Amino acid sequence: MQFFKSTHIDFIGSRYKFFIVSISLFVLTVGAFIYRGGPNYGIDFTGGMMMQISFEKELTDLQDLRNAIEDSKITSFEIQTSENLIMIRAKKTLQSQEEFEKSVSQSIQNKFPDNPMKVERIEYVGPSVGQYLSKQALYSFFFAFLGMIVYVAFRFKSSLWGVASVLGIIHDIVISFGFVILVNKEINITVVAALLTVAGYSINDTIVLFDRIKENLRFGAKETFANIINKSINEVLVRTVVTSLTVFIVSTSLFFFGGEVIHTFAYIMVIGTVLGAYSTIFLCTPLVYEWELRRNNRLKMAIKQGVINSKKK
Amino acid sequence: MSKINWKLWITVLLIAFSVWTLWPSISWFMMSKDLREQAEQAKDPILGKILKLGLDLKGGTHLLLEVDTSKLEENVKAKDAVDRATEIIRNRIDQFGVAEPMIAKQGDKWIVIQLPGIKDPKAAKDLIGKTALLEFRIVNNSQEAGRALDLLTNKGIKPAQYREDPSKYPEIEISLPEGSSIFEGRGNEGYYVLDKALLTGAALTNAKVEFGGQFGQPIVSIEFSKEGGRIFADITERNREKNLAIVLDGIVQSAPVIRNRIPDGKAIIEGSFNAEDARLLATVLRAGALPAPVRVIEERTVGPSLGDDSIKKGFMSSLIGVIVVFIFMFVYYRTSGIIADIALALNLIILMAVMAYFQFTLTLPGVAGIALTLAMAVDANVLILERIREELATGKTTRVAVDIGYQKVFWTIFDANFTTLIAAIFLFQFGTGPIKGFAVTLSIGLIISMFTAITVTKLIYKFLFKENFLLKIKI
């Protein structure tokens, strides 16, 4: 079986159209950012407390619960439900986590004496830990990017290719982040892990194409750079589709059947898979092309002006 | 031929190793819940061999404590205090009885604690957080002391407030006798002025619960070390007919009158404890007092049923995804698809075996890491197969096409995996908790997938060609 026979699409020729797509996606991200009033950072980064509880009998009215918690003198909190679980979250820096836990569970139990509640999950993050986690997340992004740039630059003997591939990753991560903000999902450690997965997938995809371009450059010295790039993209296109499809299958399965914790992760993966393949073809490679073109032009100009001996070329 | 041979041997060895390593885990997950609990109680050695599940999957409590080093005495170094606090907490948890706890220092003044499968996180937190500073001080009944007490009461200052920063209340400080301070009795019994501590809980060798109080209520009986007993005898000798206050965490538990010298180094602490309180106090006293107060700055507790739920869903969804990918590979690539599937399955098995062997912890993000690894392993095979198809299209024979396909794609796969590995290593370095779990499965998975997706599949092709099972494969 084969999805399609060899293709001859002129990707480089229509690169500006796709730059516009990327720009629109960026605009969408910024729009989501403004619309939602910034990312909805979870307690991992802001500090705060989260309790997940379940009741023996299902609650019919959440308002009762809301009142019960307000009775415990806690004013700023959110309630969310998923299936039979109820999530209570207070993001404010809390004086004492134990007091929160105690007063919340006591006032809930007072309100519903004949419906025992069970605490399924507690997460408490103190403010200093929130700062620590944010700092560590930033470090891991920074050094991972740096490491990838260095390796790609070394392998392709050009720091430009390294920078282009990391620009692709940043493109994917920023837009995926935009999609997270758009649906107002909470930014927590799991989201960071998902974004890094997207980064891993994106760089993988970019390297496969770059390797093919490098290989074709070696054998096709007579062809123009644009033709070589186009040929390379077309050659790996089937692979890109097949691989993206398999990642897509796994992510979709995680999305629908993985349960609440994995849900956000899978959501980001589904979007990131598509973006990863897209950025390789429509962003990283055209960037390399534009850059090399300009450098060549400068080189030609220099030759014309006799700065560089033309025989050398 | 010999080249094939050693690759074959490595593969066979790896499979054997995996089966052997995973066997305890398999039999563990086949066990009934009761049997597992029994094994946990008995500290069965199998526990050290099974695949370790993270707290998010197994249920349990993760705590991060901060040692408040600002309250240390001057001659104590912060580092030593944190080390000592870690040791003491370890002792307390050991006495509390948790299967496979993890207690470690993190950074300068943080202590991370993981208590898997714990039923009552509240009690554990109480136990860990108790400072349990036990002091023996003589009650000061002098006139100056009385004046200081009056001043304090008139101004409505609490003793704890005063002790926090005595220099804020100079008039009280001046009227107090040298070295003494003010303490509160338990249950609003009034305030005491006490001389400096003569003996602390550090001099204890044992503490246990007894039911010997006046009304049969629980008391904690303590035993001093030889040196402590000598000092205690000395104190009781010199302070006859005075009150000896037993102070626990700044609160006077009782202040009996010393009638006689107590030579045998034994004493009792009476307080308004219930049996559970008394047991906790005895445990804490045995393990020693914390050199400085600790505060919980992070807690993540997952109830066992939620953990079970996560395992089921995480496992089911991954399984569905993987099965669909397997079927897809077969439909799209036929024979070669099956070969790729075999490599994938091997990848998964070896990955689990390595996790179990090195006792790495599998977390929920770790499961996601496995999913990514598998995706990249599929990609490696897709790359190879697409390349072989390209070579076949130029009219090469199958055997040549397969050889060239592998050759040309090797460095691509290596580069792609290696770059991701770089990212994974930094994640491991800087990531915390769950992200670390992700980095672990991803790194191990990538390395294994390089082996299974390239070496193992090629081995299968070589074998098939050698036996002439297929001269023309469907790719």
Image: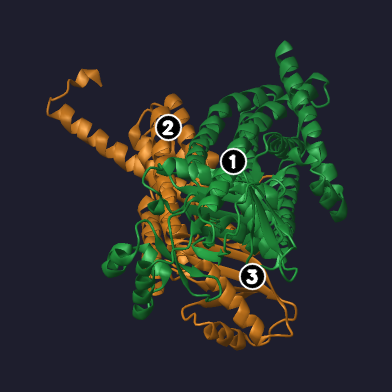
Place of residue B305 in the rendered image (x, y in percent of width and height, measured from the top left): 73, 63
> Secondary structure under badge 2?
helix
> Secondary structure under badge 3?
loop
**Which circle, 1 or 3, is nearer the viewer?**
3
Identity, as a three-letter code, of the amino acid under mark 2: Tyr
Regarding residue A282, the answer to whether it shows in the image is no
Place of residue B462 in the rendered image (x, y in percent of width and height, measured from the top left): 75, 22
Image label count: 3
> Secondary structure under badge 1?
helix
The residue that disc 1 covers is B440
Place of residue B14 in the rendered image (x, y in percent of width and height, measured from the top left): 74, 27
The residue that appears at 38% across and 63% down in the rendered structure is B164
**Which circle, 1 or 2, is nearer the viewer?**
1
Q: Which mark is residue B272?
A: 3
Identity, as a three-letter code, of the amino acid under mark 3: Ser
Q: Chain of mark 3?
A: B
Letter of the orange chain? A
Q: Which mark is residue A151?
A: 2
